[in-house]
Amino acid sequence: MTPIHKVIKDNKTSINPIWIMRQAGRYLPEFRKIRKLNTDFIKLCLNADLSSEITLQPLKRFDLDAAIIFSDILMLPYGLNQKVEFKKDFGPLLGELNLDEASKLDEVDFVKRVYPVYKAINQVSKNSLTVNKSTIGFVGAPWTLLVYILNKQSPKLKLKDNFFNDDFLINRILFLIERFLKLHIKNQIDNGAEVIQIFDSWAGLLEEKDLPNYVYIPTLSLVDYVKSLKVPVICFPRGIKNYRNYCEIVKPDAICIDYEVDPLKILNDIKIPIQGGMNPKILLTDKDNIKKEAKKYLDIFKDHPYIFNLGHGVLPETDPNMMDYLVKFVKDY
Ligand code: 1CP
């Protein structure tokens, strides 16, 4: 078993595996070099040789315990024939989803559109750099994908005033997303993904009363599906206030916490393995501070099954030397 599997499946507490959300990407000069030559982000994700290479870049530098595949949660709307672009200094920009056509889309056609993602997972999981490490596949949670599909841009900039107006439309989209997410997950697992992480990056936008409809029910269905395929599933409902309720209802195998969560409180509240927490901004400070903060999480979770990670993705302005320092500190702890 890999260290991450030992923590999730055996509740092991004496080891501290580490991987970092967005570990493959913008803070690495070797990534920027490839990105500069490949201005179309979706095309880059669909180039299996390059996306495998990018996935492995952080593993060449740091002693991480997982490879997370270089892809994006927006490959799902892309697979449904919705136009997806990434604009510099703006972020994702989507076209209109043709729901009638997407509802009739054949699963084979979806797989054809995104198959290089599966090919890359296959290549990565067979690479010698991932021996005794976990290859992590991922998807966006139904709610977070609904946000991008309907809002057509990051809700960070603006969530449209009439977002919730058409209940029937929302339910049709959620139903469609769920169906194709299962297909996307199944193909990632069949090609070598050994863990699935579900990113609900915008869960924190919802009021408590709306969580059952948009978050709990659709995510529970996905979690049950991943479990039925005998692969551990980690959920990251970023920004929600009550992680305990979430865990009791959705029942992931492990929970990834964001940086606003009080680690002492969560230790009391939650029995399942925990991942993450440290604020990514800490990596922009100095080594003493990184050590102090990382130690805080490791001390608090020393008798709890814990996977070290940040409380959101590593920031683009992070110095790779600081990442190196963090990984070594966690490994030597
Ligand atoms: O070079 C560039 O401009 C592209 C930047 C980039 C990268 C490197 C984007 C655009 N996506 C990615 C890769 C990516 N996205 C990974 C790769 C594996 C890794 O190293 O972790 C993963 C897991 C994601 C997941 C993802 N995409 C999430 C969930 C995690 C999170 O950060 O909250 C979300 C919300 C997205 C959408 C997305 N894709 C890209 C951007 C800039 C965004 C966020 C836009 C926004 O703020 O709304």
Image (cartoon, grey):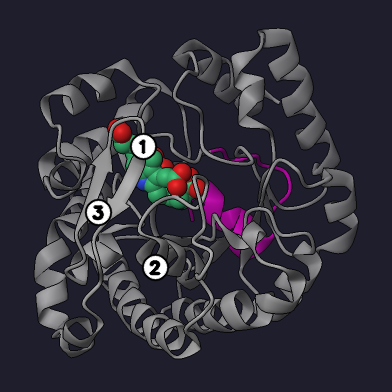
The quadrant of the rendering that contains the C terminus is top right
- Residue drawn at 72 percent across, 70 percent down: 247
Q: Which residue is mark 3?
A: 121
- Residue 83 appears left or right of 7: left
Residue 130 at least partly seen: yes
Q: Earlier in the sequence, mark 1 or mark 2?
A: 1
Judged left or right of residue 41, residue 230 is: right
In this picture, residue 154 sits left or right of residue 272? left
Q: Where in the figure is residue 79, as x and y percent of width and height?
A: 20, 67
Of the residues shown, which amino acid type is indicated by label 2? Leu
The disc labelled 3 sits on which kind of residue?
Ile
Q: Is residue 288 above or below residue 318?
A: above
User: Where is mark 2, residue-wise?
Assistant: 150
For residue 134, say whether it is visible.
no
| Residue placed under numbered mark 1 in the picture | 90
Task: Tell me which segment is drawn in magenta.
Answer: 1-18
Does residue 116 appear to the left or right of 200 in the view shown? left
